[in-house]
Amino acid sequence: QFDGVVTFAFKIPLQATPAEDPFTVSVIFLAVDDSETRITQSLEEQTPEGTAAFLARAEALGATMKTVLPGRGSYSGEASSTRTVCTVRTAGPSGNPTATLIERQVSDIAVVADDDDWPLWAGGRVARYVDVAVAYDAAGNALADVPVQVALSSTAGVLEAVNDRLWRMVPRRDRASATTTATACGHTSGPVTLRTSGYAPIAAGGYHTIALRADGTVVAWGYNDDGQTDVPAGLTNVVQLAAGNDHSVALKADGTVVVWGGRDDLGVPDVPAGLDNVVQIAAASFYTNALKADGTVVAWGANTYGETNVPAGLSNVVQVAASTFHSLALRADGTVVGWGRNDYGQTDVPAGLTNVVQVAAGGLFSLALKADGTVVMRGSDKNGHFIVPPGLDNVVQIAAGDSHALALRADGTVVGWGDDSDGQATPPSGLTDVVHIVAKKWQSFALKADGTVVAWGWNLYGQTNVPAGLVATLP
């Protein structure tokens, strides 16, 4: 029994004469037992204001399905509860309408994602992105005004929406993946798999180096004046590494942090009580940054220039970086926040800097990698590291040392610039198949696709003497 009211509104065009105007409307009803409440966003509502009103109305009605139409491009609704109607017939039979309010002849759907061959790392790009799902007509032309729904599988804690047409892998400390397809107008795209990794397999300190092996154990070499290479007995289940001037840091699979070495008088080894659920670590000089799964940052250790004074209210962070005396945070919206020493403008984020996917902090400078594969720098130009090499593009990871910088390109090659007094900015001839880079002080490291480590630059304390036979875990 239905005791409510159903209202229909008809917009009928006037004819040439009143006698030709339609005066009868026939409606056929089909009663269906359906508990789902549906709501449609009209063309007039495809504005930011209209979208807000539409969503408010859907929530008030408890709508379980939102219908959107091709039009101005302001669409609403989660992928799992939204459908696209590409043809609205106003006259003629359903198979061959003579007039339509909306008609988009969609012949194909595709998901545009990051190059699946790009390397992944946690100390760098902690989130992979699906940029947009696109509908195409029979001629292969993109139909930008057709809203496409993205269906996600196995995504609990793996993938989240940034906006209507952008999704990202959430920061994680472990390897994870999610598969996505797109649907619209009766078409479904082929699947695209996004992968992420919480692994940062190599970390370089001031005068020492540590590496993560595939079994979750750690090997260390180089200077050991404060016990920074004395890996704690029984340390296992490590998924990520970081290193400061004379201390080493390990992130375990359970989200806890272990520190060894470092100066007690500066609080370097004093991991804050109760620190857990950490997804990324960064260390430099005499302090450490930890990114938690809730997007907040915790820092401890020396605070000479405010490098551990995390800005109040900082949230939604997906990556942190640490330098000698300043820190950087990348937020999920692609913007950057800096704090600490700023005598060369190294924490002054350039106006309008957006679409950043990774940050790196050098001695007196900062780097930002943008989604288009270009690099932006800010800070001291004392050793030429402020000048990005002309034409540098297709970059997938950046790294910063004390006064030099490195960029890993999509083809697995490495570009270096800045201070090269110890050869730290000049990669070895023929170096290819690189999947991860590290720069610190005056030395550089590259992890190859076969798990081998290549090192170059300053070696006074044996920090670039990679142990024979070392095979590091791949990111």
Image (cartoon, rainbow, N blue to C red):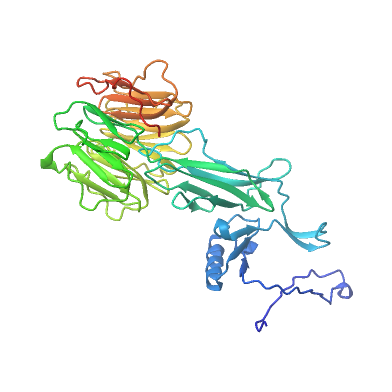
> Extreme top residue here?
429
Residue at the outermost front position? 234
Kindly indicate the quadrant of the structure image that contains residue 266. top left
Q: Position of residue 434 (x, y in %)?
A: 42, 26
Q: Quadrant of the N terminus?
A: bottom right
Question: Looking at the picture, how far across and down is residue 332, in whole percent?
Answer: 41, 48
**Horizontal placement of 432 versus 257: left or right?**
right
Q: Position of residue 416 (x, y in %)?
A: 36, 24
Question: Quick check: can you spot residue 340?
Answer: no
If the image is split into quadrants, where does the C terminus sit?
top left
Total marks placed: 0
The one nearer the camera, 368 or 160, is 160
Q: Residue at x 39, y 46 (%)?
A: 171
Q: Quadrant of residue 65?
A: bottom right
Q: Is residue 201 left or right of residue 106?
A: left
For the question of whether residue 466 can be seen, the reply is: yes
Q: Nearer the viewer, residue 66 or 241?
A: 241
Q: Nearer the viewer, residue 186 or 310?
A: 186
Which residue is located at x 75 percent, y 70 percent? 11
- Above or below, comparing residue 472 to residue 85 in the picture: above
Looking at the rendering, which quadrant does residue 63 occupy?
Answer: bottom right
Q: Position of residue 90 (x, y in %)?
A: 78, 64
Q: Residue furthest right?
A: 19
When the figure is inspected, residue 5 is found, relative to residue 207, above or below; the finding is: below
- Residue extending furthest left? 265
